[in-house]
Image: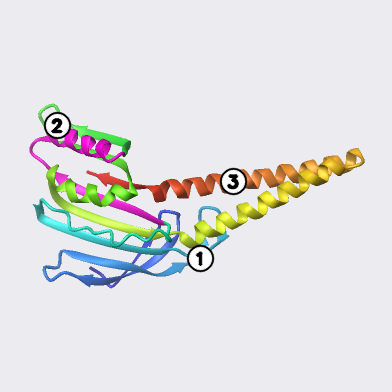
Amino acid sequence: PPDYVTGVTQRGKTVLFRYDAMTEDGQAYTKSALVYLPYGYNAEDGEYISTESVSESFTDSSSGNTTSSLQLGKPDPSRKLIYNVNYTLETKTYDDSVAALLDLTATLGGYTESSDTRGGNGSERYSTYVLRIPSDKLQDFISSVGTIGSIRRESLSTQDITLEYVDVESRLASLRAQEARLIELLGQAKDLDEVLRIEESLANIRYEIESYTTRLNTMSSLVSYSTVTVE
């Protein structure tokens, strides 16, 4: 592969990657984030926030494998990690493989977020399944996916959003403290103008609280349930 390549993280950050290692057969390699462009800029909401740590690993096999080589590493409860896994599988028993994939997903407590099927009527069929797997069961999925079909390609990306998560939690705590103080002041207001000013401030604070709460819940969901795309 090339020494450097640009990419975009799940939260919309443009990043410069460097390839770190390659297996002797030249089929598997890893890459890590070097520089965010611009540094720390979140294109989703236009804010400068703590940068994320991103790592990715890939395996590409022309002959197909029956065992996945992906490894998550030792769990660290203190970190907020988002895992994204991609598999390209090949099978001669399409219906059985799809049934096995969905059964494995349900057994692990996951669910199908979306699916798309093409072909049929005598031609080859192709499907794409986007699955959400509990992160504490993701390694179990990885260990079992080779029983569903021959693995032609696989990749794993890990995104560390710990700093961003903590930052949003801190902002929410501050906003809720401001909300409580405004409610207290509202009860002490002596005229209509003062009441209207406080109520306007409360509305703005509550809008921010709702926005940050939604953002925190989204991050929590991505951390708790990993995204697995199977083609």
Q: Residue furthest right?
A: 191
Query: Which of these two is toward me, 187 or 83?
Result: 187
| Element carrying mark 3 | helix
Sequence-earlier tag: 3 or 1: 1
Give the amino acid at mark 3. Ser
Read off the residue under disc 3: 211
Q: Which residues are magenta?
A: 81-109
Query: Residue 95's mark?
Result: 2
Instruction: Give residue 230's quadrant in the image.
Output: top left
| Element carrying mark 1 | loop
Instruction: Determine crowd level at label 2: few under 14, some 14-19, many 20+ residues with C-alpha closer than 10 A.
Output: few
Sequence-earlier tag: 3 or 2: 2
Query: Where residue 37 sits: x, y (%)?
Result: 46, 67
Residue at 78% over, 41% down: 199
Instruction: Determine crowd level at label 3: few under 14, some 14-19, many 20+ residues with C-alpha closer than 10 A.
Output: few
Vertical order, 102 against 165 (above or below): above
Question: Does residue 38 appear to the left or right of 92 in the view shown?
Answer: right
| Residue 37 shows up from this direction | yes
Residue at 22% over, 66% down: 29
Vertical order, 98 against 1 (above or below): above
| Residue 149 shows up from this direction | no
Read off the residue under disc 1: 40
What's the distance in space between the residues labelled 3 and 2, CA to CA?
Answer: 43 Å
Give the amino acid at mark 2. Asp
Vertical order, 77 against 228 (above or below): below
Vertical order, 201 against 162 (above or below): above
Question: Does residue 49 appear to the left or right of 114 in the view shown?
Answer: right
Give the amino acid at mark 1. Gly
Instruction: Give residue 130's quadrant in the image.
Output: top left
Q: Quadrant of the N terminus?
A: bottom left
Residue at 26% over, 66% down: 30
